[in-house]
Image (spheres, rainbow, N blue to C red):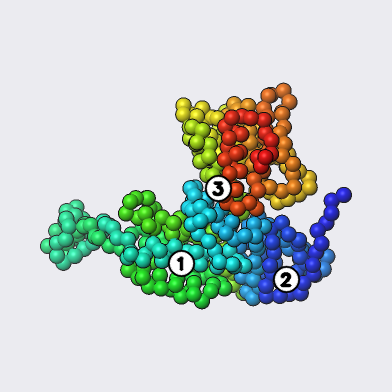
Amino acid sequence: MQLIPPVILIPMTTSLTLTEGGESRLVNLSLPEYEALRGLAIVDINPTLGAGTYEVSAGRKIGAVSIGELQVLVRPKVADLNRLLFLLGYSGKRPIWRDDRVQLAEADELLPALAETFVRLAARATEQGLLQGYQTVTDTLPVLRGRILAGEQMTRRYGLPVPLAVEYDDFTVDTAENRILLAAALRLLTVPRLSADARRRLQRLRITLADVTTPTRGSALPTWQTSRLNTHYHDALRLSKIVLAAQSFEHRAGDLAVTGFMFDMWQIYEDFVGTALGEALIAHGGRYVTQLPMHLDNAEEVRMQPDLVWLSPDGTPGAVVDAKYKAERPAGFPNADLYQMLAYCTVLAMPEGHLVYAKGNEAVRSHAVRHCGVVIHCHTLDLGLDPAALLRQVDHLADRIARRKPLLNPLE
């Protein structure tokens, strides 16, 4: 018989804290608050028999939202923020740092902790002065600078001698790298409960970037390329990408102001597995591709995207991997995951497939599929390990996959 987790009845309060995979709570909410929470999908929320009382539990997202006077905080089951930040470092499709690069001070919440880290990395990046670069500028000027745009001058300026339609290269701090730093700083300044020091340093960074174009709402961020000139910006820029990738929102639900940030833990885990395991497999040769687009059917109407495909030097698939971030549950691995992996193996003509779960209470096992010769291996990674040990576990798992050894526990 499945046990029902205990529920705690709490009165209407200005703060509700939930932990991923933790117990649910019975909370008194107004109808607008209920509708706003249900629409955000940061929690699982269900009405009860009591009027205005709802059962609320953490869902597949972590973060913090404010709905009027109510603040909802969903904490990850990875309690150590340093370890969570380590996983987040792989969200940019390549690792930002190893464990010795960044250490968070003790903090209860992720976003204020990210802000503390960001201001340190941004200060380190800009302490020698802002990165400058050449930017092509198109303008109309009373004097010649650069080259005249003859077509523009004739068609829109009717051949008049002034002003001149010109194009020139300007050496400026208004670079893509500085714009991204400014966008991240402005985003973090909206995070509630920042420390006074972090807020002050973010404001100082904002002043330092005063000559940089302020991003407009909804506009796409500029792209940047790694180079020798921007090496000292790399860590800050990749953390900026994580900050800006968080689902940020600010709107109204009726009379309630709704603001907040959310991260998908399943996406963080999938990015970590795809990048860390893919890099470990490269040590055995070939290359890896994450989110490889392919189709189940000949008509190419049913799309599929396995999280990781390891390819040999000639492009032949050597392994297919799917990452599954699942909460602990006594029923074992979901059967639907096995069916999905079987489809991947069938399309790729692979004799083996690999499901990699965040460690729960399931036993590691392999499944030989009848009549088709496919074996599906279910692995687990222990996110409670320190980063160095977790990466050793990933390396061990990569060795098992590459050598196609019978699966045992990757911890042994």
Q: Give the residue at mark 3.
A: 271
Q: CA distance from mark 3 to mark 2?
A: 35 Å
Q: Give the residue at mark 1.
A: 119
Q: Give the residue at mark 2.
A: 29
Mark 1 or mark 2: whose residue is earlier in sequence: 2
Expressed as whole percent of the image width and height from the top left, the position of residue 249 reads: 55, 64
Left or right of 241, for residue 373 = right
Q: Mark 3, mark 1: which one is toward the viewer?
A: 1
Q: Are marks 3 and 1 in contact (CB under 8 Å)?
A: no
Amino acid tagged 3? Asp
Quarter of the view holding residue 340: top right
Q: CA distance from mark 3 to mark 1?
A: 24 Å
Expressed as whole percent of the image width and height from the top left, the position of residue 3 reads: 84, 54
Amino acid tagged 2? Leu
Residue at (41, 73) in percent of width and height: 204
Quarter of the view holding residue 238: bottom left
Q: CA distance from mark 1 to mark 2?
A: 37 Å
Q: Residues within 10 Å of mark 3 (few under 14, many from 20)?
A: many
Expressed as whole percent of the image width and height from the top left, the position of residue 308 reads: 56, 39
